[in-house]
Image (cartoon, coloured by chain):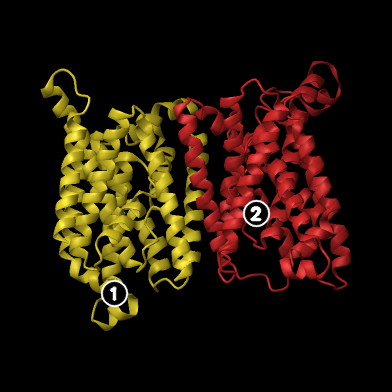
Amino acid sequence: MNRPTAAPRIASILWPIVLTISIAGLVLGSLATGAADVSLSELFGGGEAGEFLAVSRLPRTLAAILAGASLAVAGVIMQMLVRNRFVEPATTGTGECAALGLLAMLLLAPEASIFAKMAISSVAAFAGTAIFLALVQKLPPTQPLLVPLTGIVYGSIIAAVTGFIAYENDLLQYLSVWMNGEFSGVLQGRYELLWASGAVALVAYLFADQFTIAGFGKDAAIGLGLNYRTVLISGLSIVALITSFTVLTVGMLPFVGLVVPNIISRFRGDNARATLPLVALMGGFLVLASDLFGRLIRYPYEVPASTVFGVLGAGVFLWLLFARPARRG
Amino acid sequence: MARTFIFLGICTALSIVAFMVLGARGNWDFILSFRGIKLAALVIVAIAIATATIVFQTLTSNRILTPSIMGFDALYILLQTTLVFTLGSFGYVTLQPEMKFALELLLLSSAALLLFGTLLGRGIQDLFRMLLVGVVFGVLCRSLTSLLQRLIDPNEFSFLQGSLFASFNRVDTKLLMIAAPLVLGSCVLVWRKRYVLDVMALGRDQAINLGINYRRELLIGLTLVTALVATSTALVGPVTFFGLLVSAISYELVKTHNHGPVLIIAGLISITVLVGGQAVFERVLGMSATLSIVIEFLGGLVFLFLILRKVRA
């Protein structure tokens, strides 16, 4: 799975550097873009313009990077656990379950603290994904495309249930906020949960080797001395937490976890310890780019980042379905 | 078979009566004509979706793919939005509704024939890949649609929103005069081709062996399907799993491959579910817009069930 040749040595340094520089460029662009007409030098000069920076533009930029990076990491982990290139929180019902959990809390315990809501939403996401995994176990391993197909339909069934409940209680508005990720509402004090999401993604990095081994399949992993069950449960927890953090703060960004790991794995292989930082950087880069694109294309109106990414993601997904599998990967 | 026909006929009649009568108060003349128009629209939609799905499944010789799952109606909405985007809302609104619909139909037919004609021309080798391609293609169309809608001036968009998105509750009755003859005409053509369809259902190679001009019939069939889907989408908006639900129940009820009885049964079931469901949800339960959600839910379950059964077989 990993390419043990000499050339990657340069590439392994080059990739992170190029990505970091691109992100830095985007960050500057993102900080300079907004409805208020303020130049970059004014922004950093403090005063009223500096407040823009601290309250709105910097949080928004950070939120996009954090959400993108952690969702991409969640995608990689799912793909290793399910052993399928096409799964990610939006094609396994995870996002829909997180929203269902949030909706339940809104109806049953509207007074609950944000942490209680978070907890229930994560539990729902975890349970929903576990059910999906159990369902997938029944599918023949010779039909890898059945997995995402089943997952998408499973997600839309859950979405129908959620939609029904939300409609009857006049809560559809909330649902559309949770399911359509955008960053225009991000302000200081309203996105900080995403730091927790980023922290969870960092924890995933500590377990990277275990996930790589789990990606060999259950029997092989157990044969290699891995506590498969524990790794599976911790992986699912990481995915559930990241998904529900994202759904609650900025809304679901479908396909991030699908597109990014597939691009990275085509060029850099599947060793999680080596690729996870790249995946995170690429995720942050692409989501920030989508957000910036959405802000510029119809300035001063905005297009949600999830809409921009939806087009990109579905396009890449179709390409992956038709393209030959990368033999060298 | 005869008993199934009679039973379904009674069900259809009952749901139509329920739809017209339940919860009616006041002037009967007004009620009957008001509801009659809506009923006519729902019946047309029901027949269009049922026929389109059955024909499409025959053309692709399988029982899981449907036009909506392949993204036909998402494509239609995308084309409609593209028209608004390129013509501007003023240009779009000032177009005659008939002209507008004809233009959209032409665009959809050419796009669908181009996309799916090449995709389906060789017969389906890998059903699951095709299904996934269809689902993702639908997602792509919907994402592009919402992107374009965001790019249209917000003021213009809010003005247009009403006319763009129909639903079971807000049936676009203006189009009824064009939709009715179109759907009926297509259905007559399908009916006359029912024996050809019986042969097509055997699969591409068998059909060619038996002397069918496969490419020609495929093109005709796809064009009819496109016309039917476009009409139903224009009237009530996209419904992903309804066609699948109807065709699954039909084939479960009639154990035959002859298109004659299947088409009639599917039409009756479709009317019963749509009209009866709307009557129950709107009049009895008081939950107006949720019929489509329930249909999507049930249809999704049926879809999963069919896939899993296909895998077992």
**Subunit ID for the residue under disc 2:** A
Q: 10 Å neighbourhood of mark 2: few (<14), some, or many (≥20)?
A: many
Which label belongs to residue A316? none
Q: Which residue is mark 1?
A: B214
Q: Is residue B73 visible?
A: yes
Residue B252 placement (x, y as % from top left)? 30, 60
User: Which quarter of the figure has residue A105?
Assistant: top right
Query: Which residue is depicted at the point 21% across and 43% down?
Result: B43
User: Which quarter of the figure has residue A240?
Assistant: top right
Name the front one of labels 2 and 1: 2
Residue B264 placement (x, y as % from top left)? 19, 56
- Figure check: B70 above or below A240: below
Identify which amino acid the numbered label 1 is placed on: Tyr
Identify which amino acid the numbered label 2 is placed on: Leu
Q: Nearer the viewer, residue A75 or A232?
A: A232
- Figure check: A220 above or below B38: below
Answer left or right for A214 relative to B175: right
Q: Secondary structure at mark 1?
A: helix
Question: Which color was chain B given?
Answer: yellow
- Figure check: B5 above or below A188: below
Badges 2 and 1: C-beta atoms under 8 Å apart? no
- Figure check: A238 above or below B3: above
Q: Nearer the viewer, residue B156 or A5?
A: A5
Q: Which chain is red?
A: A
Answer left or right for B231 relative to A143: left
